[in-house]
Amino acid sequence: MIKPVLLAALLASVSLLATVVQAQETHTVTDRADRQVEIPVSPERIVTNFLPFPSAYYISTGSVDELVGIAEDSRNMAERSVFGRIVPDLLNKATGFAAGNSVNVEEVLKLSPDLFVTYENNPALADIEKIDLPVLVLDVLSRSKGNVLETFEGWMTLLGQVTAQQDRTSEIIAFAHATLDDTRGRVADLTDEEKPGALFFARLEEKSLKVNGAGHFGNFWLTESGAQNLAPADFAPLADIDMEQVYALNPEVIFISNFSATKPEDLYQNRVPGQDWSHVKAVADRRVYKIPEGVFQWYPPSADAPLMLKWMAQKNQPQLFAHYSIEAEIKAYYSRFYGYELSDADVASILDPQF
């Protein structure tokens, strides 16, 4: 909530901001929360606290010039990954206006934004709207129930309208559709026995084991790429699990998101305190995989979403998807949609993130 004592200080800034916004030509778009929002036809100063947004904006425009403020974790991820090498200017964007889910309205106003972008259920939304700043809301799980490529398509469609880059975003969407159609076609006739049983860990740490059930990203990635999600049907989309349940399910394949520092080697060498992974089939067969990270983490929706499906498919059904090299696919995607020629070392850092 905005404290009453701050209202007077904000009024002058709001008045100035309103004058700037009124001077711009505007149009109305429908955001991903089905809100009608009047925004500038050509936003020039965008602030966002949504972590994957810089990657989505960059693929849809080929620029980050209009982003004047981003979440600190977005900057940190870019700094540690290939994204910071592709777009070094992203590392210089302002970050001090946000901390976690909180947004400091005064600091936002100092950036003179003409558009704010956030995510569904962000508690700071009400405060931002009080200063008459246009706010676009992007969805995470509410519309697609974990279908990452559907969410990705929705973001691209909206950003095409926001940035007048519909031709560019339509091409990106078409590539995503082609990837999904090809993958579905190759796994469509698999029997349950031909699909490895898998668990997708959103968290895998000493005191936190969380897997994805139906309705979350991991379930989409597993089921679309030719695996069975062993998370029981009564599990929540993001569910706690214990080692006894892991032993009972005995997954053939395990995936670990980047939201945990744990790596496959930690399970192979039994280095997670209080847990014994040595008798789990995926560990014994050395089929534990850490999710890649390119312009953003590949587990949630991001600009690299089509590549995640290609990577997952080769891990779950290596014989069915031996017709392409994932390294070549990554290089071609980055060249086509980011205008950046990756080195072999760049690709290796994406597929095996060292953090």
Image: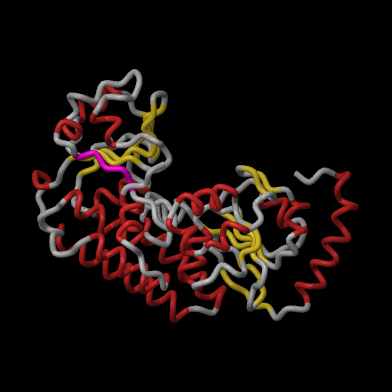
Residue 44: x, y in percent?
Answer: 66, 72
28 horizontally vs 279: left or right? right
Would residue 232 appear left or right of 55 to someone viewing this image? Answer: left
- Which residue corresponds to the image point at 78% horizontal and 52% vertical from the top-left? 106
Please state if 93 lies on the left or on the right of 231 as rendered.
right
316 versus 340 height, above or below = above
The answer to which quarter of the image holds residue 209 is top left
Q: Is residue 267 left or right of residue 103?
A: left
Nearer to the camera, 34 or 63: 63
Is residue 271 depicted above or below 152 in this figure? above
Q: Position of residue 234 (x, y in %)?
A: 32, 34
State the image coordinates of residue 161 (x, y, percent, origin top left).
Answer: 53, 75
For the question of whether residue 109 can be seen, the reply is yes
**Residue placed furthest toward the right:** 8
Residue nearer the viewer, 277 or 93: 93
Give me the residue at 64% from left, 78% from top. 41
Viewport quadrant of the N terminus: top right
Question: Residue 154 placed where, x, y %?
Answer: 45, 65
**Range drawn in magenta:** 287-291
Residue at 12% x, 46% y is 192
Whether residue 43 is situated above or below residue 350 in the rendered picture: below
* Magenta run includes residue 21: no
Q: What is the chief secondary structure element of the magenta stretch?
A: strand
